[in-house]
Image (spheres, helix red, strand yellow):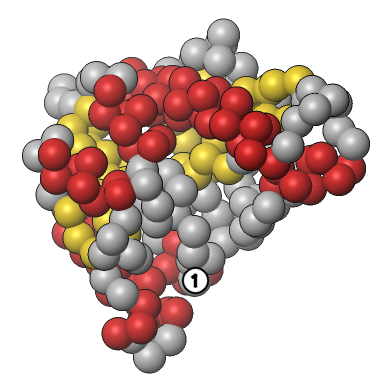
Amino acid sequence: MDRPLRVAVLASGRGSNLGALIAARLPVEFVLVGSDKATAGALALAAEAGIPTVSLSPRDYADRVSFDRALFGRVAEARPDLLVLAGYMRIIDAAVIADWEGRAINIHPSLLPKYRGLHTHRQCLEAGDAEHGASVHFVTAELDGGPVVAQARIAVRPDDTEASLAERLLAEEHRLLPAVVGAIASGRLRWDDGAVFDGLPLSAPLTPADL
């Protein structure tokens, strides 16, 4: 590619992973940050960085499919090469996300396939796991079920709470997600009917050291 990778981001919250992406100064062009919440901190971060923003409210649409079509239509208008779900908290209609196969990634706070969905830190502690982690995966219609491309791991401490575990893991997320986006921007990581890294089909999740 003879130009920077065009990246759009969707986020529902404060936007800490978006902030990490911006701070990493990757060879990308952020073309849009979108949200389902007008008050999302991610929108303020984007505006400060001069990135176009859009927010739509699900309450303004008859159903989930209508909302998803509207929001993803706005994303498509920005012509991104890659869509990054960075703390986007809505389940996306299967038909809508199908159009983005191989062009959308998500970061999830667990070692997938463990603990899909919400409350991953609580589930990790309740299960007595010795380690926890974050995963970046290509997005498919299956909730948190697309091919995992990279993971970061941390040890669970005896005195960990949900809050302490989340805080320590977030620091790893802030390294992992920019590393994956950077690998996509450089062409090392791509989609070809499956994840391909350095020209070979990816058989196991990458580690931060691999990237």
- Residue most toward the top? 209
Residue in the picture at 33% in, 64% down: 37
Query: From this viewpoint, is residue 96 visible?
Result: yes
Q: Position of residue 144 (x, y in %)?
A: 62, 51
Q: Is residue 114 or residue 16 the one in the foreground?
A: 16
Determine which quarter of the picture holds residue 166. Answer: top right
Name the kind of residue labelled 1 in the image: Asp
**Is label 1 in a helix, a strand or a loop?**
loop
Q: Quadrant of the N terminus?
A: top left
35 left or right, relative to 170: left
Q: Position of residue 59 (x, y in %)?
A: 35, 83
Q: Is residue 166 or residue 107 the one in the foreground?
A: 166
69 left or right, relative to 162: left
Residue in the picture at 30% in, 49% down: 41
Residue in the picture at 79% in, 41% down: 124
Q: Position of residue 187 (x, y in %)?
A: 36, 21
